[in-house]
Image (spheres, rainbow, N blue to C red):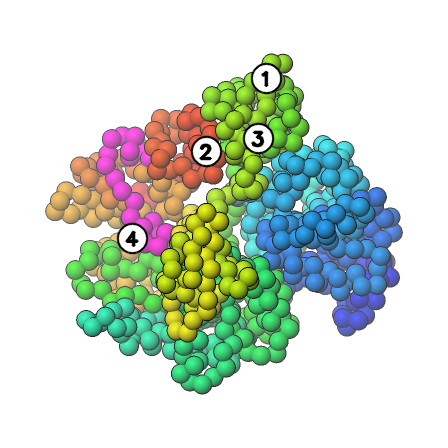
């Protein structure tokens, strides 16, 4: 029987209305698994391949045939924006059914939530943080909503897998299973997975159910990629912007004019700056203002308005965005993608590339790179733009090998164990240590944490008043812990930066991090604002819109560790004279300059350079984790060293008071003799980056650092002794 024949009537009607010729291969495969097995399912295919429908067509059919007594399908997304997008898509699919779809997150009114609580059914769309809040504050609602839960669909599963947030999500799902005595089938969706086995293990965690990942053919997509390079002077002697920078913005204007596109940047500040300059040029050229902004500090109303305009309008709109438009939000057909600077990963590049070229059209992505003209006084390695090289390596790895970073799930998430312990006790009240260990330590993500280590953590939490002992020898939330869990920020396991709400005539525009004072101007949501009043107590800034351009600044996080494979590709690019055909002439010239510097100093290979001050510059072409591991080993040996980075690219490690021969012997010893990192001495005020690590004893924090930050085996693999002899 064809899988189409097995689908519910309302789904067949939808397929007819949408004029589909047939089900896609991934949809056929998903239907086969859902209809004929009870296995978990991983759907890992390219962008716009029909994954979402592949997950929902068979699950909705089964829900139609056998209605659930509660919410039947729980859809979990990393972004509220993606939830809102999928909500619209699902409503069209469910038009002629009796199945409802409901959103549940921080922007949804309590009245709407109460409607679902009174009649729990259909599909519920949410985030991990909203589920955490529900488990902590209203576990009876969890039982009511999910007592007959059949399926859990996790969108963009790769974005969870190697993050603390993914550990939290797996814990939440297991806790829901225990509360409701259900074992729903899990379905994971991703467009950028390279290691299916790791993803399958992650997805099936705690379910005692195998996972199937159908292998389907991905249609060959035509790609159009180019990279333009600009040298710029940011300021002249008179303090005005140099013409070379204006040429850069003029180029951005030209390549986006008359095109429906996204202009990606890696920072909110650059996103706002780019759109302000494009608006300025449009005004000078008397062309329409078609420019919008989309990032995480703009209000949900304004973000959704931008998404709607991009999706519904036939105008050639240009939206400057950060990663918030990277994932699978439907914003209609795009003519091209433009990226300023280097994507933070190959995975990010693939996601952004996949935003264009739908419905048989070529995927088109233009990279635009700018760097300041140097004065010739810098050290030789500073004359190399390592971020530029990273961009080339990122593109080449995907074009040549279809390589995407493998994902390594957390092995020792002790900080999340603290968080889940607090959440469980907040939900259940006083609990005995044995019962606590039975319910929390037994969760699958904590399999590498021993009972003795958990006991050590609990003692530490008591000492710091996160927990307190009760008269009955139980544990409850302590005085300091009450303060911690009472803040809404506790529901998340990732760091959130303090922000001030920007308000104009009662409308929330978004948020900024700096407390701008009366009279100051700043940019937000593609517009310029002047401050009328700053209310520090309420963290509110009242503004009015003004003409002209302004700037803004946000603190941010780096893009995560660069993989060693990318660094080895950089070495390969430096080590040959092959022409890269997608480069403009200016970009080819810049690559030639960089290659000449590398050859002159012999760092196109793996080499150690000696300086007059008796320091060494070692270029091992290792990833961030490997470089940090080497740094820690050298520290432990009492050898002064420093990792040099260029926009998160760890290109070199400086070493003092050590000869070249001594360093070579050290590298040999690491590669051939070192067995573990048990002797590593961690300086926590520098290396700690987990949100709740300050509530974890040093001994356990050290173990987490060794397990999840360092990587000895990869370092040993990456050291090329032949190249440094």
Is residue 501 visible to the viewer in this orientation of the structure? yes
Say whether marks 1 and 4 touch (CB < 8 Å). no
Say whether marks 1 and 2 touch (CB < 8 Å). no
Q: Residue at x 48, y 35 (%)?
A: 692
| Between 40 and 465, the one nearer to me in the picture | 465
Image disc number at residue 498 = none
In this rendering, is residue 50 above or below 130?
below
> How many angstroms separate mark 1 from mark 2 (CA)?
25 Å
In this rendering, is residue 280 above or below 4?
below
Q: Residues within 10 Å of mark 2 (few under 14, many from 20)?
A: many
Image disc number at residue 605 = 4
> How many angstroms separate mark 3 from mark 2 (CA)?
14 Å
> How many angstroms separate mark 1 from mark 4 (CA)?
63 Å
> How many angstroms separate mark 3 from mark 4 (CA)?
51 Å
In this rendering, is residue 264 above or below 699?
below
**Res. 219 image quadrant:** bottom right
Helix, strand or loop status at disc 1: loop
Q: Is residue 472 magenta?
A: no
Image disc number at residue 422 = 3
């Amino acid at each position: 029987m064809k899988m189409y024949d097995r689908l519910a009537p309302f789904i067949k009607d939808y397929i007819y209305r949408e004029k589909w010729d047939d089900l896609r291969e991934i949809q056929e495969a998903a239907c086969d698994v859902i209809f004929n097995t009870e296995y978990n399912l991983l759907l890992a295919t390219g962008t716009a391949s029909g994954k979402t429908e592949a997950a929902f067509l068979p699950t909705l059919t089964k829900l139609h045939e056998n209605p659930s007594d509660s919410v039947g399908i729980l859809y979990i997304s990393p972004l509220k924006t993606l939830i809102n997008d999928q909500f619209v898509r699902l409503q069209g699919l469910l038009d002629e059914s009796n199945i409802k779809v409901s959103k549940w997150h921080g922007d949804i009114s309590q009245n709407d939530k109460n409607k679902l609580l009174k009649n729990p059914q259909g599909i519920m769309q949410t985030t991990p943080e909203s589920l955490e809040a529900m488990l902590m504050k209203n576990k009876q609602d969890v039982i009511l909503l999910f007592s007959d839960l059949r399926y859990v669909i996790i969108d963009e599963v790769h974005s969870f897998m190697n993050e603390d947030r993914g550990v939290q999500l797996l814990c939440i799902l297991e806790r829901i299973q225990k509360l409701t005595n259900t074992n729903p089938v899990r379905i994971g969706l991703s467009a950028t997975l390279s290691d299916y086995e790791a993803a399958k293990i992650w997805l099936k965690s705690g379910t005692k159910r195998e996972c199937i990942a159908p292998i389907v053919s991905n249609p060959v997509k035509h790609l159009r990629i180019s990279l333009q390079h600009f040298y710029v002077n940011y300021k002249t002697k008179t303090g005005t912007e140099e013409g070379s920078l204006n040429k850069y913005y003029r180029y951005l204007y030209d390549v986006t004019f008359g095109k429906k596109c996204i202009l990606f940047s890696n920072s909110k500040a650059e996103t706002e700056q780019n759109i302000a300059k494009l608006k300025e040029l449009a005004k000078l050229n008397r062309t329409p203002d078609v420019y919008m902004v989309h990032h995480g500090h703009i209000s949900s109303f304004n973000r959704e308005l931008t998404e709607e305009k991009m999706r519904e309008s036939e105008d050639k709109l240009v939206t400057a965005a950060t990663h918030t438009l990277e994932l699978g939000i439907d914003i209609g057909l795009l003519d091209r993608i433009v990226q300023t600077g280097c994507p933070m990963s190959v995975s990010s590049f693939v996601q952004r590339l996949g935003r264009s070229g739908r419905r048989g059209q070529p995927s088109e992505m233009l990279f635009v790179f700018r760097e300041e003209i140097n004065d010739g006084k810098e050290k030789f390695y500073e004359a190399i733009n390592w971020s530029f090289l990273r961009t080339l390596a990122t593109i080449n790895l995907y074009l040549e090998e279809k390589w995407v970073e493998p994902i390594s799930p957390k092995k020792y998430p002790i900080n999340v164990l603290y968080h889940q312990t607090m959440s469980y006790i907040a939900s259940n009240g006083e609990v005995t240590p044995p019962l606590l260990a039975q319910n929390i330590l037994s969760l699958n993500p904590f399999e590498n944490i021993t009972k003795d280590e958990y006991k050590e953590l609990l003692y530490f939490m008591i000492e710091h008043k996160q927990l307190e002992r009760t008269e009955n020898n139980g544990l409850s939330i302590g005085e300091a812990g009450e303060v911690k869990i009472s803040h809404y920020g506790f529901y998340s396991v990732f760091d959130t930066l303090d922000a001030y709400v920007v308000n104009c005539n009662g409308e929330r525009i978004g948020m900024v991090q700096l407390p701008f004072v009366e009279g100051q101007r700043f940019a937000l949501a593609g517009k310029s604002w002047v401050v009328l009043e700053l209310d520090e107590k309420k963290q509110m800034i009242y503004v009015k819109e003004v003409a002209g351009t302004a700037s803004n600044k946000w603190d941010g996080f780096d893009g995560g560790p660069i993989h060693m494979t990318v660094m080895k590709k950089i070495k390969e690019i430096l080590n040959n004279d092959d022409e890269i055909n997608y480069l403009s002439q200016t970009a080819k010239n810049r690559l030639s300059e960089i290659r000449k510097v590398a050859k002159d100093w012999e760092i196109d290979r793996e080499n150690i350079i000696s300086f007059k001050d008796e320091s060494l510059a070692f270029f091992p072409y290792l990833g961030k984790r490997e470089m940090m591991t080497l740094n820690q080993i050298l520290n432990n040996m009492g050898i002064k060293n420093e990792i040099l980075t260029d926009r998160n690219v760890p290109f070199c490690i400086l070493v003092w008071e050590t000869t070249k021969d001594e360093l070579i012997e050290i590298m040999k010893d690491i590669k051939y003799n070192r067995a573990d990192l048990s002797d590593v001495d961690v300086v926590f005020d520098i290396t700690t980056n987990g949100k709740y690590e300050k509530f974890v004893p040093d001994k356990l924090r050290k173990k987490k650092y060794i397990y999840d930050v360092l990587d000895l085996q990869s370092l040993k693999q990456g050291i090329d002794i032949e190249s440094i002899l």
